[in-house]
Image (tube, rainbow, N blue to C red):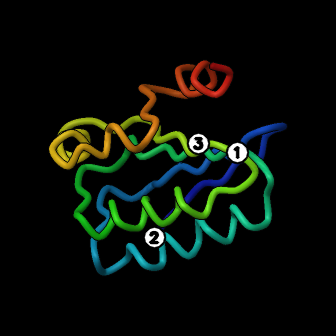
Amino acid sequence: MKLSITHEEKVVLIQVLDTRLDASISPEFRKEIEEIIQDENKHIFLDISSLKFIDSSTLGAMVGILKSMKNNNKLIIIGASGVVLELFTLTRMDRVFTLAEDLNDAKVKIMG
């Protein structure tokens, strides 16, 4: 699993560079993101725009990540599209997560 991590003033931007997240790597994905959350007291922007496929175990990992957020910090999912966005919609996870189209949209949602 490949991630790009950028630390900004109030935000950590985590970009998933893989095109697939499934049961074989979702536990590692969750663990790595939760470690970042523990080390940082910031909002998390999770850019999944490169993903072409996720499964239910990945959604479960994302729910776990969301639950581990602290101090009223937000987790914003950026760039879900195609079948990935369809899975969020079909499972109604689009109501659980804050979804943003791009980085600028995510920054607006954090202020609002």
Q: Amino acid at mark 3?
A: Phe
Task: Please give the residue where the numbered disc 2 appears in the rendered image.
Answer: 1
Quadrant position of the C terminus in the picture: top right
> Is disc 1 in contact with disc 2, using a CB cutoff of under 8 Å?
no
Q: Please report whichever mark, 3 or 1, sits nearer to the chain's N-terminal start.
A: 3
- SS at circle 2: loop
- Residue 40 position within the rendered picture, expressed as x and y whole percent measured from the top left: 79, 58
Q: How many marks?
A: 3
- Residue 95 position within the rendered picture, expressed as x and y whole percent measured from the top left: 34, 37
Residue under the image location 22 percent in, 63 percent down? 55
Report which quarter residue 79 is drawn in.
Answer: top left
Quadrant position of the N terminus in the picture: bottom left
Residue under the image location 60 percent in, 64 percent down? 68
Task: Please give the residue where the numbered disc 3 appears in the rendered image.
Answer: 45
108 is higher (above) or lower (below) than 95: above
Could you say which is closer to the camera, residue 82 or residue 74? 74
Q: Amino acid at mark 2?
A: Met
Q: Nearer the viewer, mark 1 or mark 2?
A: 1
Task: Please give the residue where the numbered disc 1 appears in the rendered image.
Answer: 72
Q: Amino acid at mark 1?
A: Asn
Could you say which is closer to the camera, residue 47 or residue 74? 74
- SS at circle 3: strand
At label 2, counting other C-alpha atoms closer than 10 Å, the crowd grade (few under 14, some 14-19, many 20 or more) is: few
- SS at circle 1: loop
Residue under the image location 79 percent in, 38 percent down? 10
